[in-house]
Structures are given as structure tokens and as C-alpha cells.
Image: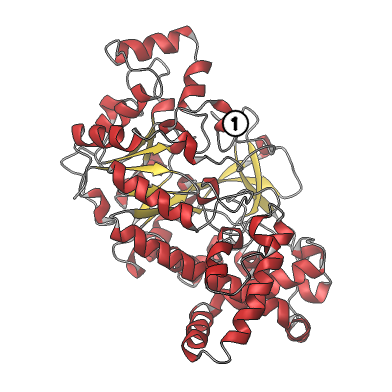
Amino acid sequence: MTENQQTFTGSPLFADRRAGVLLHPTSLPSNSGFASGDLGKDAYRFIDFLADAGFTIWQMLPTGPTHSDLSPYQSLSAHAGNPELISLDALAERGWISLDDPGLHSEETGERQAARRRAANHFFYTIQHDRHLGHQYDEFCQSHKSWLNDFALFLALRGHFHRKAWNEWPLELVQRDEQALAKAREQFADEIRCYCFEQFVFYQQWQDLRRYAQHKGIYLFGDMPIFVAHDSADVWAEQHNFRLDEKGNPLSVAGVPPDYFSEYGQHWGNPHYDWERMEADGFQWWLSRLRSQLNLFDLIRIDHFRGFEAYWEIPGNVKDARQGKWVKAPGKAFLSACFNEYRNLPLVAENLGVITDEVEALRQEFSLPGMLVLHFAFDGNADNPHLPHRHNLLDIIYTGTHDNDTTVGWYQSLDAAARRQIDEYFFHGQDAMPWLLIKAALASVSRMAIVPMQDLLELSSEHRMNMPGTTDKNWKWRFRWEQVPDHLAGKVRKLLTLYDRLAN
């Protein structure tokens, strides 16, 4: 497909040249001393920084509640927000917890959860007298009841059973016996109410932040994993949509074969969808999931898009990802249903890794922007699609992603031949890394360029967000405001002006 043939009916954000920053909210600083950032004052300050620099996109990772490994790609819910992102400072400002609450300055998850429980108790006392606030809460619960009720019950039961996976619970709960569920809802009513409160507060704080971002000309770019965690409210509540045995164990799980990120492949463990059943009801589960994401974001990346054309199927009782096989998926029928429901659906396809002509044909049939990563460009082949002279208007160009090393660390790891290719390709430019690659991304013909925050701060490998195929030290990186030079916003704005990325 040539540039003249390209059309796009999705997000209007691709009508102009613009740029953004990749930073997950947990990587924000926090004045409260939390183990991760939140939706509080530092999130607003970050939006101010983006606006001052001329950026118009804030890209982040999935924002759902995580398991203990903190991976945002293995969430407890495809719909819920991560309660750890709730600003306790904001709750204190509303008078729902005291200003000296021990959770306010604690890095302990239990302490922060206890603070949210205290806020919930105060809230439910308050709405007995505040009809407007009570109406807001009731309206939220009603609007989100399709997933909220099951999610809150799931968390209550998971806590009661010491965080065991749902398929290890008593059989009547695994199989969702109606009497057993009704009894549990009554037994854990207080816990359920608190979990509903957390989602209400998350949604309120998110929408406040989103309105502020829109006021500053900043659009939020979210990330939706193609698969969901087996130990999640979604799989427990809608087992018929997944390939499980009668005891709730996955018959097959997701992953990828050996690739750039891992020589042994990756075993993700997510259960596969029962695509035949999903297609039979018009993909209603997916349409509901997309609706939740559209309530939060202006643009949505689908992680592992190639899984809609064919997915890597690993037997459920096998741990070696290399023993999987490719199985066809109903990608065209799925995407047709999505665009019929949401006419201008603002989707972006993550098309990195083992990508076939069939995958690219599916993406282009629906005019979905893909991803280009400069770290992948310099393999010695002049036809590498990640090289700037091969870029397309409607793809998004990155220096690197959350799965890559920082650009400084990446460059330091290159051999002499790769460094020589970079030097020759960029006319023996004098800019040091990472700014040589940042400028290359901004100069690209691609209308959207995204730079990880680590690259803007010139940080080395120890500051990377994730190392695929490993489980240690991932998803914990945070920046500090003292790492942000006073001149950085002005420096970036000059570059965005130079490369015509100050979007209107």
C-alpha cells in the first residue's frame, strides 16, 4: 500500500504531526513516598511538563489491577482500574481520611489498602446525608454493573482464600453455583462495598485528570493486552468464553515462539479464547471491554495484534513455549464487529515480533497504525522497515518501547558494526545518544512519534521498565523530578518546532 493509497477513519490524532511520551503512571514520582506513582499532584505536574514541551500524547501501559508480580499485562480485571493508582492525598483533601493517616506515607500495600478502607467507611457515612454524592456513586455502580459486581465479589473471595487462584476455590464457587454466590455476596458485603468504592474513586480521579489533560491539549494513549490473566474476574465470571476444562484449568495458554526478546520463546500462561463461541454472539465480551477502554483513553494500542490473525497455542500442561503451534483466529470478523459497533474506533496495532504478510494484510485492511522501533532498525539490511527511509505516515515511530532497553543502554550494548551503520546512516552526526535517536524519531515522516521518558532523561540500562522473559525487578522504575533538567521542556519544544510536531 503506498502513501497515496493509505486511508484512515479511526483517530483524528493522526491528521497532524505530533509527539508524545511513554510513561506508565506508576513511574511517576510521589510526594507521599509510595512504592509507585499515582493519579495525584505529580500526574498533573507531568501533564504540565508535556504541555510546556509541546507534546500532545501521554502513552501508558495497561492500568488494571495487577498480581503480585506487578505486570500490567496480567491484570485481575479487563475493566477495573488499579486501586494503587488512587491518590490518597486527594482522599485526604476531601476529608475521607485524616491528614495524618498512616497509609499516606507508607510503601506497604496493606497500609494503603487499609487507608482506602477507612476512606470507604467515611464515604458511605457521608452519602447518607449527601444525596448528590450518593447519586453519583449509585449511577457509577449501575453503569458498570456488567463487570463491577463480579469483580468486587471476585476480590472478596480471593482475599478470603488467601489469594489462591479461583480454580483452587471450593467447587461450588469455581462453578459459580447461584446459591453459593448469593451466600458469598451476603457474607462479604462490607468487602464488596469497599471494592466498589475503590473503582468509583479511581474513575472519578481518572476523569478529573483526563479533563485536565484535555484542557492542556494532551491526549491519553492506553494499552489493551490481547489476552487476560487466568486468575482474573473476567475468566472466573465468563468461563464459557475461554478454553478451560471442567475444573477451570486452561486447555491451552498463550505465548510466543523464540524471537528478538527471548531465544526460548515466552510462556505467558493466559488462557485462550473460545473464538467460535465469541463469534457466535457477535464478540459481545470484546465490545464491552472496548467500551471500558474508550471511557478512559483517546487512543488504544492492542498489544500482540498478530494474535488476531493467528495465535501461539501452548498446551495447558506444558511450560516450554517452544512446544506451541500457530492457530488461526477470526481477526477479520472480530475487527468488523468492533468497527461496526464503534465507527471511528481509535485503535493502534502492536505489530512487533514474528509478523507475517497475513498479519500486515489484516492490519492494513482496517487502516490500523502499526509500530516502528528504531532499536530494531540497524541489522545491516537496507530494507529493514524500522529504518527511517522505510517509514509510513500512519505508523508510530518509537526510539524504544517499555520492553526495550533504554536508548543509552541499547547503544552501549551494540557491536562495532552496528555502531558503524548508525554513524554512516545519520551522516556521522555529532549528537550523542539518546538525542541522535530522539531526533531521528521526531524527523520521521510518521505522523506520531513517541519517546520513552527514560530517553528524555538520558538514563542507562538500570532504568528500563521491563525485560521480557524475566520476572525480577520489572515494572518498578520511577523517575524523580530532580532528574528533569530545567531546560528540558524548552529543548524539546525547539525540536518539535523544527520537525513540525507542535500539533494544533
192 shown above or below 262: below
Residue 240 appears at what percent x and percent y? 63, 69
| Pick the front one: 477 or 277 | 477
Mark 1 closeness class: few <14, some 14–19, many ≥20 residues within 10 Å: some
| Pick the front one: 54 or 78 | 54
Residue 478 appears at what percent x and percent y? 55, 41
Which residue is found at the position 48% from the left and 80% from the top?
Answer: 143
Residue 172 appears at what percent x and percent y? 81, 77
490 shown above or below 143: above
Q: Amino acid at mark 1?
A: Pro
| Pick the front one: 343 or 86 | 86
How many numbered discs, if any?
Answer: 1
- Residue beneath label 1, please? 258
Image-based side of 185 in relation to 395, left or right? right
Quarter of the image that includes the N terminus: top left
Tell me the quarter of the picture where residue 191 sits: bottom right
Residue 131 seen in this snapshot: yes
Q: How is the image coloured?
A: secondary structure
| Pick the front one: 138 or 99 | 99
Residue 244 seen in this snapshot: no
Q: Residue furthest left?
A: 4
Tell me the quarter of the picture where residue 345 sits: bottom left
Which residue is found at the position 29% from the left and 50% from the top?
Answer: 367
Residue 22 appears at what percent x and percent y? 43, 43
Badge 1 marks a residue whose secondary structure is: loop
Which residue is found at the position 36% from the left and 28% from the top?
Answer: 386
